[in-house]
Structures are given as structure tokens and as C-alpha cells.
Image (spheres, helix red, strand yellow):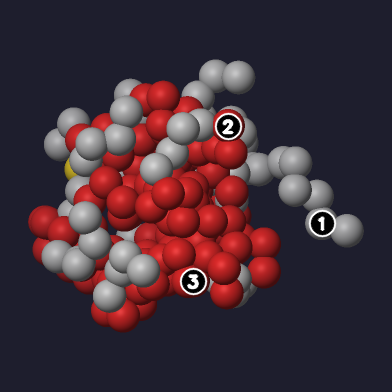
Amino acid sequence: MTDHTSRPTQPRIEPITEFDGELEEILANALTHEGRPLNIFGTLGHHPKLLKRFNLLGGYLLNKGLLPPRERELVILRVGANARAEYEFGQHTVIGLQCGLDQEEIDALVRRPEEHDWSDGDRALIALADDLHGDDCVSDATWARLAEVWSDAQLAELLVVAGFYRLVSGFLNSTGVQLDDGIPGFPDS
């Protein structure tokens, strides 16, 4: 049985902190915190070609996708909570607050979301993340609820968003990427 209780407490791959040449060019438009590239990008910087393509897809999903930002962040945060990916959850706490989620909603995604007073639409998005976490397939019941609201293109994007951030969470957890200074982790218990 796999031990799901621990995560690396130190980086398994030290992030690059000096960016020049190809890396500087790749990171010119990447998310930063206090003017510095995020630790995830420093870690992925060991493989510049992968980082470039990672940023293309991630940047598209965050900045040019079809999904409303609040709903996108709700899915990303629930994926991060399910994966126990503190780095992911912290980064998207900041983004989620900017996109219309409030701290109570964000906290509820970690602590008993079933007890929060979510809208039916929010509950369906949370169920999508939970279904994928539990079985790698959205259930018929969840799909039917989502299909009442979202177009086929939006449904496809919801799945890609959830899948991309599941990949990101696994990368972050496995490589031990540490929180960037000033970024929150999981809410206090």
C-alpha cells in the first residue's frame, strides 16, 4: 500500500534561480511572485523544452480558455486539495481570491466541502474534481448536471483543466517544490 501521508519537505530537484538565455526568454511572460519566477518554473527549468510547452498549455488554460475564472479556480483548488498539493493550493488560493472566490469557500474546499452552502453549479464542479480523483472518470450523474450548464467545448476544457492540474499536483508533490515566499499553504485546521 502506498503511503499517502508524507510529502518531501525539501526539494528533490533544486529550482534554478539564475535565468539567462533560453530560460530567460521562456520565462519572460510566466507568472512571477515579487518579480521572481515561481519555484515550479525554476524546477521545470532543468528541462527548458518541457517548461516552454508546459507554460503554453498552462498559460492558455489560465488566460485564454472558455471557462469563467472563478469556476476554473474552484476546480483547480479542489484538485489541489484532493492531491494534497500544498504548493498548488497556495498559488491558486491567491489566484482564486482575485477571481471572485472568498476565503471561506477556499477553506471549505479542504475542510468538508459537503457542509458548505455551494450553489448547484459549484457542487457539480467539485463533484467533477472528486470523481476524477476517485476513479479517473466523471460519473454519469455528475456529467448530466454539468451538461445542463456547460457546452461540449467547455466540458472538454473542464476535463483538461482538472487533468492538467492533477499532473501539476503530482509533479509538485513528487519533486518537493517549496512554497514561494509569502504564498499561503493549506488553511489552518
The amino acid at mark 3 is Trp
**What is the residue that sits farthest to the right in this orientation?**
1
Q: Quick one: label 3, few (<14), some, or many (20+) residues within 10 Å?
A: some
Q: What's the residue at 59%, 49% (across, down)?
A: 82
For numbered disc 3, what is the local secondary structure?
helix
Disc assigned to residue 143: 3
Disc assigned to residue 2: 1
Disc assigned to residue 11: none
The span from disc 3 to disc 2 (Cα, nearest Å) is 22 Å
Q: What's the residue at 54%, 43% (across, down)?
A: 81
Disc assigned to residue 115: 2
Q: Is residue 93 above or below residue 41?
A: above
The percent position of residue 58, horizontal first and vertical second, equals 28, 64
**Quadrant of the image containing the C terminus:** top right
Mark toward the start of the polypeptide (1 vs 2): 1
Left or right of 185? Residue 70 is: left
Q: What's the residue at 30%, 69% (across, down)?
A: 150
Nearest to viewer (mark 3 / mark 1): 3
Left or right of 187? Residue 55 is: left
Mark toward the start of the polypeptide (3 vs 2): 2
**What is the residue that sits farthest to the bottom in this orientation?**
152
